[in-house]
Every structure is written in C-alpha cells, then in structure tokens.
Image: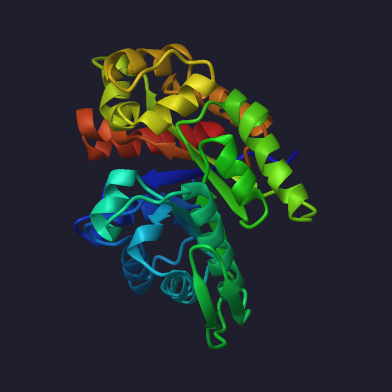
C-alpha cells in the first residue's frame, strides 16, 4: 500500500481570500497534498479557489462539503469545472445536505430523504463534468442538459458520508466519500463496507476512495486537550446526526452534553493530540483502515491560540507524516 496522503484544511469561513495564502503555500511547497475548505457563507469556496488561481497559487483544492440547497446541479457542475480550468488541477468537490433547519431556511422545507437527494445530485454533477449530455428524470431533479466542451481537468465529485445509509447511496455514484470526525475503526468497519455495497449494487468495479477530516493539535505547554477538543468540535457535538455516528462507533456521547463528548473524543483518540510523531502514528491508523487521504483540521488551535500556532502545528504534523 502506498504512503498515506496528508492534506490541510483552511478551517474557517474566509472573509478575505488572502487568509488562504499560507495554507495554500503548504501545498505548493509539497508539505501537503491538497488544500481543503468547507462551505463558506462569507467568501464562497469556489470563488476563493479562483482568487488563489489568479494569485498564481495553482494548487489542488477540495471542498468538503458544498451544500446542495444553495445551487442547482448544473450550476454546481459549472462551478466545479471552472475551478478545474482556472487552477489547472482537478479539484475534489464534495456535496452534502446540511442540517434540516438550514435546508428549511433556504428551501422552505427539509429534505424528506437527504441521502437519496445527495446521491442523485452528485451523480448528475459527476456526469456533467465528465462531458455527458444528461437526460435525467429523478425524484428530486429533472433535466436535459450538457455543458459545452472545455479543456480542463475533470473534477473529482464526492459526497459527505457519516453513516452507512449515505455510504450505500453514495457508493454507486461518486468518486470520493468525505468523512468528518469519524474514528478510523468506524470507517473501516461501517463506512467502507457500506460504500462497497453501494458500488456493487451499481455495478461499479471499485468503491469511492475515502477522505477523512481529522481534528488534531500538537501537545505544548499551556494547552489543554479537553478544552481544545470542545473548542474545535463543540458545534458538531451538539448535532444529533454527528452524535449518532459517534455512538455507532462506540463513543458515549449525546448532543445535550458537548463537554462530555469532547472528553470522549480525546480519550478515544478521535481528537488526535500529542507530539508530532505520535500524531503521525495515530493518523497512519486511518491509512491502515483504508483511508486514502487524511485532512488535518487545526481549528481548535486557531480558536484557542491563534492562526500562526495553527499553521505551526500543520507544518510539524505534515513533516512528521512524511
């Protein structure tokens, strides 16, 4: 098995694309494979990537995940392919349904079947960016459309996958499954089999590759891993669907008690804390579990100790992983 790929996450919603530059430089220098960011409601991710390209930072990027409620699949395909052309690199664009409350605020009602919708959406986008004229009559989308030919790398299309239902739905239609806060053992024992089941049902030879976003921080004087874990993952620890995933993985968490949940993340090694070499060993366990790409998330360090400290952690962990 080849060496694990390690990438970095810009862990906030950017208000100025210049904030992304030192993170992109980690990728340009070869310390990391790809620069990832999530959905931003400030400077939007595809636009931030276009700015980086205009600034001469032609680096591989990933968005994990863009929210389906915000754009039609045709526009999603157009945005993904535009980033590919401007970056001259194939981006990875993952899609997700978001919290039902957010979907309701945008569309007026929650999705009845989020996993099915995301799989249908991502499947349409994937066909469009690969140059197909799509004729589709599905439960959520109907279209007869294709994009004009463009000389650009083909984007890699993914979906956010937390639980086996989404894994089965995504396994037959996407290139990449993107996890967030999921333990390595859970990815090996639950998510990857679900992806494989979905791929088999669709007649695909191989299931999607797996990308894992992992919260981490380097142990230093004056740092408290429990406070760091709560700062960086507290919002997810109040979300019922994340807590359900973590309980399936064997953690004792509940959305009403994020402080206790943060302790579980530290105790079970889901929030990876320690010296850079120890962190590297823990992250290699994700590779052993079949994860193709580990994405380092140092949001907690940024919140508690500042952006420069978060970047220093990324540099040291990337060096240890190499």
Residue 278 in view here: no
Q: Is residue 221 above or below residue 188?
A: above
Is residue 145 depicted above or below 197 in this figure? below
Please, is residue 280 above or below residue 322 in the view?
above
Q: Name the residue rendered at 49%, 74% in the picture.
A: 81
List x then y, in percent, for residue 13. 26, 50
Residue 141 against residue 260 in the figure, above or below: below
| Residue name at image x 60 percent, y 78 percent | 134
> Front-most of 241 and 288?
241
Residue at point 61%, 82% (across, down) = 133
Query: What residue lies at 45% left-to-right and 26% top-to-bottom?
Result: 244
Residue closer to the observer: 138 or 51 = 138
Image x and y of residue 74, in percent: 46, 75
Query: Where's residue 62, x and y in %?
Result: 46, 55
Q: Nearer the viewer, residue 172 or 40?
A: 172
Q: Could you say which quadrant of the image residue 173 lies in?
A: bottom right
């Amino acid at each position: 098995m080849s060496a694990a790929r390690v990438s970095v996450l810009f862990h906030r919603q950017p208000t100025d694309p210049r904030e992304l530059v030192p993170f992109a430089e980690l990728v340009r220098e070869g310390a990391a494979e790809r620069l990832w960011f999530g959905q931003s409601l400030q400077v939007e991710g595809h636009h931030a990537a276009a700015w980086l390209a205009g600034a001469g930072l032609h680096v591989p990027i990933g968005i994990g995940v863009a929210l389906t409620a915000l754009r039609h699949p045709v526009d999603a395909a157009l945005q993904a392919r535009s980033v590919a052309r401007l970056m001259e690199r194939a981006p990875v664009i993952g899609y997700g349904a978001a919290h039902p409350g957010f979907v309701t605020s945008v569309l007026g009602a929650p999705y009845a079947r989020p996993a099915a919708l995301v799989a249908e959406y991502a499947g349409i986008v994937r066909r469009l960016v690969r140059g197909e004229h799509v004729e589709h009559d599905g439960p959520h989308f109907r279209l007869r459309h294709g994009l004009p030919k463009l000389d650009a790398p083909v984007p890699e299309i993914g979906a956010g996958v937390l639980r086996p239902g989404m894994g089965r739905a995504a396994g037959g239609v996407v290139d990449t499954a993107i996890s967030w806060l999921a333990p390595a053992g859970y990815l090996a024992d639950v998510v990857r089999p679900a992806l494989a089941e979905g791929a088999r049902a669709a007649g695909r030879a191989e299931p999607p590759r797996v990308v894992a976003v992992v919260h981490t921080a380097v142990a230093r004087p004056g740092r408290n891993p429990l406070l760091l874990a709560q700062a960086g993952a507290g919002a997810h620890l109040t979300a019922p669907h994340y807590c359900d995933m973590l309980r399936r993985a064997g953690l004792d968490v509940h959305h009403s008690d994020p402080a206790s949940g943060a302790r579980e993340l530290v105790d079970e090694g889901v929030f990876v804390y320690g010296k850079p070499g120890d962190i590297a060993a823990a992250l290699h366990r994700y590779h052993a579990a079949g994860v193709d790409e580990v994405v380092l998330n140092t949001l907690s360090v940024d919140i508690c100790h500042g952006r420069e400290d978060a970047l220093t952690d990324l540099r040291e962990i990337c060096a240890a992983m190499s």
